[in-house]
Image: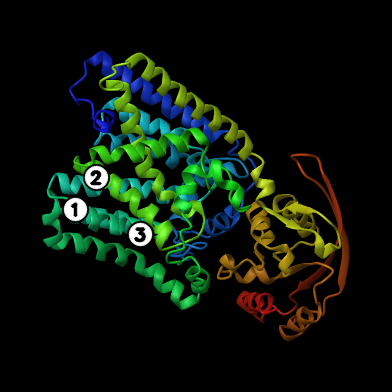
Amino acid sequence: MTEGLIETADYGTAGGGKSKRYLLVLAGVVVFSFLLRFYGSWLPFFDDEPEGVVLANTISITPGRINLPIHSTDHGPVMIYLIHSASPIARGETFRYRLGHLLLGTFHILLIYWLAREATSRVGAIFAALFLGLCEVHILFTKYIIQELANLFLATLWLFVFWQGLKRDSRKLVLLSGVVLGLGLLTKETIFFLVPTAFVFLLVSRSYRRWLRRKEIYLSLLLAFVILSPNFYWNWRHNWFDYKLASGYVAPLSFAGFAAELFLGWFTHLRGSDILYGYDYMGPAAGCLATVGVLLAFGKVRQEFIKLIVVAFWIILGASFFLAAGLPRHYAVAIVPASVLAGVFAGTLWDQGLARMQRLRAVRVFILLTFAAMAIFSVKATADFNHYWVSQSSIPLSDWHQSGEIDLTTLSKAFIPLAQKYEATLAVFPAPALDATGAYFTAYSNIPSIGLHATLRWLEYEEEDLERIVFFLTPKDNLRRFRDWAQENDYPLPEVSRDEIIVQREMDNLDFRFPVRILVMTRKDPERHPTAQDLVQLVYGR
């Protein structure tokens, strides 16, 4: 029975009219998927997006001011270059920064089609593309600036290039797969799951086991780490990466199984409040279809490409049970093989029915209903995501002796008029309670800032940024250390100003009102050149 379910349809060459219909259907899938991702892409920043935006805005190829960062937020720099790639050609407060992600996520759907085409008919490949297009997790990853999207794209590209290298017996393509892997490591380290995938697949494959004796496999791995090395060196020199935090993700025999939660979290997500629909798990229709496709793929592992895809999925799943913990989105690479196997399963049913039972029409109706359910959940999720910028980017108001929370977009935009009023060239947010307010403030205003968010600790500042420094303080902040710094760096001793923030949130017209203390430092001696890093150290050395 399993053999019949996974038996792949004949590739035969379709007639011209049929080919056009396939192309039209694929185009419809891509357009609908694009619209799901486009809707709401102009909304306020979400989660850690502003940090990437601030870093992306530092990229410059202007002679005399060249700046090409080899680091990013918590991972490699690919994401910030993706942000920078499209921002000059688009408009909108947030959309112009998200356009690169929007385009890459849409193209990823086409890439999944080409990858799945190695395993199944055109119909199955279209179903694989449709699965990814309707997958709630992929929609959120594309709609917002999240590193996982480029990671998924490069994982898909690696599988495609690596397989083509093996199939064509091309040493150059295998070496090229090392370049793709290196770029993936510069995006997010979780793409490393593909390294054991390659070696386990070659070990169990009779057709391609000979590659284990070829130097190109090992050279491609070396090439990947050479590409990663500048970022790794930078992290080491700047103590950037929190190794203690990272070591917490290494949990042998934890049996956490977060990769499984990525697909079945709709049914199990109540176990943790940090698990978020779309961000960490997909809807029930997508999760069930992927699970069935993965399980039934065992019946066709004699086909070498499907064997590669199956190995990739189960290595990621196994790692989440036996080697590491984390969150479901840390295992998002598993979406790539799951999309292919879901497409293979759906395409085979569409082409052949239930084998011996031959109930082709009923089976096709069932498949269409399954994808219709996916579409309903994805449309609902797309609307729900429009509220995440509040729920996932809020801080408590306890430092102002008030109850409740305020989102960072509303808070940071409330500080912008004050910064303009006091003619700030640099804004400082030293209070731990303000969290990532500085990043949001700079992303919205383009006024440089210093805050306590570690990912922006190593930003470069211009000398003119220190002309007029405005400190925004909570009632709990100690003023003495800032006044001491002003005196040491020949700034006039600042007086405390008091102002009041009155702001209304756009989404629900909720009003916020609380006091703020302000210190203004204006440099009086143009010959003295205090460094911004001294001020950064002051803020971080609370």
Kind of residue indicated by mark 1: Val
Secondary structure of residue under mark 1:
helix
Examine the rendered structure and indicate whether residue 95 appears above or below residue 39: below
Examine the rendered structure and indicate whether residue 222 appears above or below residue 415: below
Q: CA distance from mark 2 to mark 3?
A: 19 Å
In the displayed orientation, state which residue is furthest to the bottom: 488
**Relative to 535, 210 lies left or right:** left
Q: Which residue is mark 1?
A: 204
Which comes sooner in the sequence, label 2 or label 3?
Answer: 3
Image location of residue 289, percent across then percent down: 42, 34
Kind of residue indicated by mark 3: Phe
Q: CA distance from mark 2 to mark 1?
A: 9 Å
Image location of residue 250, percent across then percent down: 45, 67
Image location of residue 184, percent across then percent down: 37, 55
Q: Which residue is mark 2?
A: 307
Question: The N terminus lies in which quarter of the figure?
Answer: top left
Residues 216 and 204: in front is 204
Examine the rendered structure and indicate whether residue 303 appears above or below residue 68: above
In this view of the protein, can residue 111 be seen by the observer? no
**Relative to 536, 303 lies left or right:** left
Q: Which of the numbered marks, if any, corresponds to residue 192?
A: 3
Which quadrant would residue 29 be assigned to in this image?
A: top left
Secondary structure of residue under mark 2:
helix
Does the CB distance between marks 2 and 1 fall below 8 Å?
yes
**Relative to 256, 398 lies left or right:** right
In this view of the protein, can residue 389 be seen by the observer? yes
Q: Residues within 10 Å of mark 2 (few under 14, many from 20)?
A: some
Kind of residue indicated by mark 2: Lys
Question: The C terminus lies in which quarter of the figure?
Answer: bottom right
Secondary structure of residue under mark 3:
helix
Q: CA distance from mark 3 to mark 1?
A: 20 Å
Image location of residue 140, percent across then percent down: 53, 42
